């Protein structure tokens, strides 16, 4: 009973921070920058971890951990209410192919460069790669339980997403206005959706242009989001295979399937039937954003700067390499796929 009370106290404590993060993210200036409550939450969590941590009862750590693990999985499942399979069909084969190619190439490139070239550990490399490849902070959050990564590694990956996603928000419109991006509305919409990190950042950039740009960008972005489920399942199978190769004791190793990713697809499939009124779906999405903010805040609360020692500039170099690939490679891949598919 005492343990349950500690979890509840910790959960309430994190939720208060998350509520504050939500209110800050709703300030017009912050909203215009495309900064989501998730990002504000992790910043507040990190501030707490490195300043006020010792002034809060240690017993509440159980609730903070619960928020970072259990609440996170629940929130990822209900993220499926943001997507319908109809949206994926609407954007066409070209949009889907660009999403798929950019996801695969960015994740593989980021993981390879992080581990082999910049000598980072596997978890930080894969978390940073998933954030750039799929959908920013939410993808990092979804990948963390599959890798069983430490909180500070998740924080590193999220910080890279925030940095380069923010740069993209200002750079893409500047390059488009300067005529450097020679693209039709359809091409530019697909390009934005397939290469910018966060959903909020995609909306912020695309909403300044035509309805076609905006619609295609958001739908392609949501296609990337739904692709996280098969990516995580494949990642789980790969990690099990790697563990089996290294297992010299003859002990039977279990394949760990990230069931929350499977449930995510089921929820998206259910949402595709349009059985629930849109007003209720909107409420579910609002609640889900808050739960994701709770999880992100809790991850920030487990992040102490002392744990960052030894990482150096490797995460920055890895994220920069992926950003260049998304910016340049994404441009040529979008042009080619739209022209020939």
Image: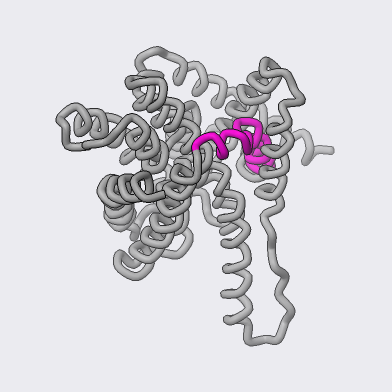
Query: How far across and down, in percent of the image, does residue 51 sit?
Result: 43, 34
Asked if residue 155 is positioned above or below residue 254 in the image, the reply reads above
> Who's the residue at 56% across and 59% down the image?
147
Q: Quick check: 44 left or right of 312?
A: right
89 magenta-colored: yes
Q: Quick check: 194 left or right of 188?
A: right
> Who's the residue at 50% across and 36% down the image?
91
In the rendered image, which quarter is residue 244 located in? bottom right
- Regarding residue 63, the answer to whether it shows in the image is no
> Who's the residue at 39% across and 38% down the image?
190
Q: Could you say which is closer to the camera, residue 336 or residue 258?
A: 336
Name the residue furthest front. 340
Asked if residue 51 is positioned above or below residue 259 in the image, the reply reads above
Asked if residue 185 is positioned above or below residue 128 in the image, the reply reads above
> Who's the residue at 38% across and 27% down the image?
213
Q: Could you say which is closer to the camera, residue 320 or residue 224?
A: 224
């Amino acid at each position: 009973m005492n343990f349950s009370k500690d979890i509840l106290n910790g959960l309430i404590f994190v939720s208060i921070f998350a509520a504050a993060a939500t209110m800050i993210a709703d300030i017009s200036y912050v909203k215009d920058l495309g900064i989501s409550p998730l990002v504000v939450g992790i910043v507040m969590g990190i501030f707490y971890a490195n300043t006020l941590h010792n002034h809060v009862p240690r017993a509440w750590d159980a609730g903070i951990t619960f928020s970072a693990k259990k609440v996170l999985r629940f929130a990822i499942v209900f993220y499926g209410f943001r997507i319908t399979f109809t949206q994926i069909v609407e954007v066409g084969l070209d949009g889907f192919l660009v999403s798929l190619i950019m996801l695969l190439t960015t994740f593989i490139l980021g993981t390879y460069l992080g581990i082999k070239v910049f000598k980072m550990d596997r978890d930080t490399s894969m978390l940073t790669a998933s954030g750039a490849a799929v959908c920013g902070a939410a993808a990092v959050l979804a990948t963390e339980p599959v890798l069983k990564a430490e909180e500070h590694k998740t924080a590193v990956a999220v910080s890279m997403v925030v940095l380069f996603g923010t740069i993209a928000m200002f750079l893409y419109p500047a390059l488009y206005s300067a005529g450097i991006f020679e693209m039709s509305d359809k091409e530019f919409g697909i390009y934005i959706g397939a290469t910018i990190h966060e959903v909020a950042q995609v909306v912020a950039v695309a909403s300044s242009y035509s309805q076609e740009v905006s619609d295609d960008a958001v739908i392609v972005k949501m296609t990337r989001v739904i692709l996280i489920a098969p990516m995580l399942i494949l990642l789980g199978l790969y990690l099990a295979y790697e563990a089996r190769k290294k297992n010299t004791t003859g002990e039977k190793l279990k394949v760990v399937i990230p069931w929350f990713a499977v449930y995510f697809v089921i929820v998206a499939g259910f949402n595709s039937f349009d059985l629930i009124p849109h007003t209720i779906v909107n409420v579910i999405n609002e609640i889900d954003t808050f739960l994701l903010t709770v999880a992100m805040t809790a991850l920030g609360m487990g992040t102490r700067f002392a744990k960052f020692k030894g990482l150096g500039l490797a995460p920055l170099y890895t994220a920069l390499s992926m950003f260049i690939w998304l910016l340049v490679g994404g441009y040529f891949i979008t042009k080619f796929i739209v022209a020939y598919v």
